[in-house]
Image (spheres, grey):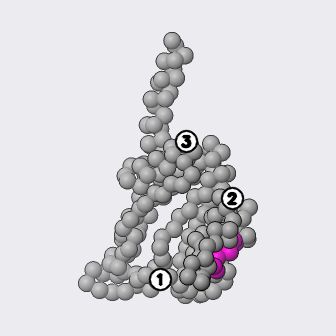
């Protein structure tokens, strides 16, 4: 009875400890839920955090948005590493485009426009080499000029890490080859551990 009670007390207090490490808010809830899903064997989890499309008050909004994601993502990575799950879990942080290095002025104050020519994606765990960067933009920070990586390359690399050969997923339709990575993607081996 005592051993069971001690187990129940520990189990009841564990979520409060985790909750404190992750902070509060929708993104924190999403990161904590993602951790729990990964612990139970779910193969793919997406945690969405919107509001980054700032064409006005960019500096103020991005500082606030970053403050809301730093703590939860750090707690998620720390928990995955502590449990050994980071070795087999790919964590990918990305948006659908970057932002220009210059601001635009308008009625809503300074903002930054969309930029598909140079932006950052970061990855951790799951066979990704840690503590390195791959690629650079020009001196202005506008366009990728070194080790340019297309989204099809990113997809090919992730599929490779998940044990899938993206080239074997090719099918022919209307005289053209198609696959998830188009026919141009290739695995970026320089970022693999």
Q: Is residue 60 above or below residue 161?
A: below
Q: Tell me where residue 170 sits by quadrant.
A: bottom right
The label shown at residue 40 is: 3
Specify which label sits upstream in the sequence, 3 or 1. 3
Q: Tell me where residue 61 sits by quadrant.
A: bottom left
The nearer-to-camera label among 1 and 2 is 2
Residue identified by numbered label 2: 163
Q: CA distance from mark 1 to mark 2?
A: 32 Å
The reply to whether dot 3 and dot 1 touch (C-beta < 8 Å) is no
Specify which label sits upstream in the sequence, 1 or 2. 1
Q: CA distance from mark 3 to mark 1?
A: 37 Å
Q: Main secondary structure of the magenta part?
A: loop
Query: Secondary structure beneath disc 3?
Result: loop
Specify which label sits upstream in the sequence, 2 or 3. 3
Query: Secondary structure beneath disc 2?
Result: loop
- For disc 3, the neighbor class at 10 Å (few under 14, some 14 to 19, many from 20) is few
Kindly identify the residue that appears in the image at 33 percent across and 86 percent down: 105
Whole-percent x, y for residue 189 in the image: 73, 70
Residues in magenta, as a range: 181-188
Look at the image and tell me whether residue 39 can be seen: yes
Kindly identify the residue that appears in the image at 36 percent across and 67 percent down: 51
Kindly identify the residue that appears in the image at 46 percent across and 57 percent down: 47
Front residue (pair 64, 55): 55
Whole-percent x, y for residue 117 in the image: 53, 84
Q: Is residue 184 above or below residue 20?
A: below
The label shown at residue 115 is: 1
Would residue 65 appear left or right of 154 to someone viewing this image?
Answer: left
The nearer-to-camera label among 2 and 3 is 2
């Amino acid at each position: 009875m005592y051993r069971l009670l001690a187990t129940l007390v520990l189990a009841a207090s564990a979520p409060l400890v985790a909750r404190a490490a992750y902070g509060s808010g929708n993104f924190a809830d999403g990161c904590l839920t993602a951790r729990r899903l990964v612990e139970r064997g779910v193969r793919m989890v997406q945690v969405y955090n919107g509001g980054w499309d700032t064409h006005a008050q960019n500096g103020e909004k991005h500082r606030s948005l970053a403050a809301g994601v730093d703590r939860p993502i750090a707690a998620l990575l720390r928990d995955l590493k502590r449990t050994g799950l980071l070795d087999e879990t790919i964590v990918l942080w990305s948006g659908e485009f970057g932002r220009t290095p210059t601001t635009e002025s308008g009625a809503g104050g300074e903002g930054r426009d969309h930029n598909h020519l140079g932006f950052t994606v970061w990855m951790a765990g799951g066979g990704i080499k840690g503590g390195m960067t791959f690629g650079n933009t020009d001196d202005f920070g506008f366009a990728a000029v070194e080790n340019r990586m297309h989204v099809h390359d990113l997809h090919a690399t992730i599929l490779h890490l998940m044990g899938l050969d993206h080239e074997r997923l090719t099918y022919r339709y209307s005289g053209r080859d198609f696959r998830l990575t188009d026919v141009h993607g290739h695995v970026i081996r320089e970022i693999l551990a």
